[in-house]
Image (cartoon, rainbow, N blue to C red):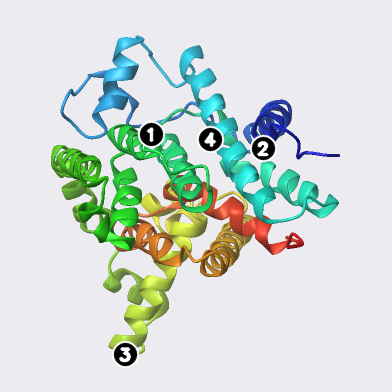
Amino acid sequence: MNINGNSPFLRIFFIILLLKPLTSLVMVTIVFYATDISVWSYGDFEFYKENHILGPNFLYGIFVSLIGAESLANIILVILASFISIITDTICVYIFIMNFKVTKLFFVMYLLFSLHPYFSYYTFKLDTMIFGKLACAVFLFKLLSHQAKGKFLNYTMLLMSMFRASSFIFIISIFLKNPKILFQKDKMHWGIILILTFTVIAINYAYFDMMLSSKKDFGWSVEYTKAKFGEFGTIIDITIHYLIKLFVLLGGREAVYVYKFAYFENATYPNLELLIFMIFALFHLMSLGAFILFSIKSKISAAVIISLLMLILSMFTFGHMRYLIVYYPFIMMGWLYIGSVERDL
């Protein structure tokens, strides 16, 4: 199949348009009947419906209020979520085929990734995370595509940060990678971008304050993990604690974070749930590691590592698998990179 042609981006878009909703729907249906987990569950939605004009992720609240959405099942939200998901995958696949050969293994790897049960829910689920996912894809496109030198992409990332505050990290990453841009010909543009970015951060101050206090609120402390696993000395105890939190971030649903190990103790099939949890965590860790190797080879590792600081912060504050959605493009690219075959120069 010749995916490359005069308009490879559009070719990829239409292929994913046919494939992505179908694979996601299959997985959502299977998971729903196996676990009764609804796509439309979103505890914070009632808060956003109240239209907090200058509150956390304020454009999201304004948008759902304007369209009168009562839940994530609103058809406008579902269509928009699907479109963002398709565009995100299109950008990632486009970047990939610009760097690597399109092989049968690539199609198998992409199909397997499309069947990821947790990510499949976010094909149709328009919560704030999906805007972070798009911002991350735009960030990658800006770093890796020779066609991405315009100002439009910076404003897109800025706009996404108004829907999902943590998206600002991608703008900051580009700036910190090359702070000299403030003294180049686009200094006025970057001055405006940075002023607006820090304005968004200031507006979301209450949200970040809540994040910082969440560890105390949910009882994730070194004392808790010591009570579960025993005491081995301060350094080892702290190491065990943050390794567990890392695995919860990489593989645990929100219920795992909220109820801690009681989640598994009360599960119908605790060993199976724990196995799935570990498989997710190892898969995401492997894919992120592969993506970091790809970023080093592509000479974009500085910006990538800076952008990952927000994910690392989640491990120390409020962190479970939902927070990986923003870094979905990194995970996808890392997974595809594992089976990649380099283009001939």
Query: Hey, what amino acid is under mark 2?
Result: Ala
Residue position for label 1:
152
| Dot 4 and dot 1 residues touching (CB under 8 Å) | no
Q: Earlier in the sequence, mark 3 or mark 2?
A: 2
Q: Earlier in the sequence, mark 1 or mark 3?
A: 1
Q: Secondary structure at mark 1?
A: helix
Q: Earlier in the sequence, mark 3 or mark 4?
A: 4
Residue position for label 3:
233
86 w.r.t. 271: above or below: above
| Dot 1 and dot 3 residues touching (CB under 8 Å) | no
Residue position for label 2:
34
Mark 4 or 1, closer to the camera: 1
The extreme front residue here reads: 185
Residue that appears at 59% across and 66% down: 290
Quote the CA–CA distance across marks 1 and 3: 52 Å
Q: Position of residue 293 (x, y in %)?
A: 56, 69
Q: Position of residue 16 (x, y in %)?
A: 69, 32
Left or right: 114 with respect to 124? right
Q: Quadrant of residue 4?
A: top right
Q: Earlier in the sequence, mark 4 or mark 1?
A: 4
Quote the CA–CA distance across marks 2 and 4: 18 Å
Q: Secondary structure at mark 3?
A: loop
Left or right: 66 with respect to 337? left
The reply to whether residue 241 is visible in this rendering is yes
Residue position for label 4:
122
Q: Position of residue 270 (x, y in %)?
A: 59, 57
Left or right: 181 with respect to 88? left
Quote the CA–CA distance across marks 3 and 4: 41 Å
Quote the CA–CA distance across marks 2 and 1: 43 Å
Q: Secondary structure at mark 2?
A: helix
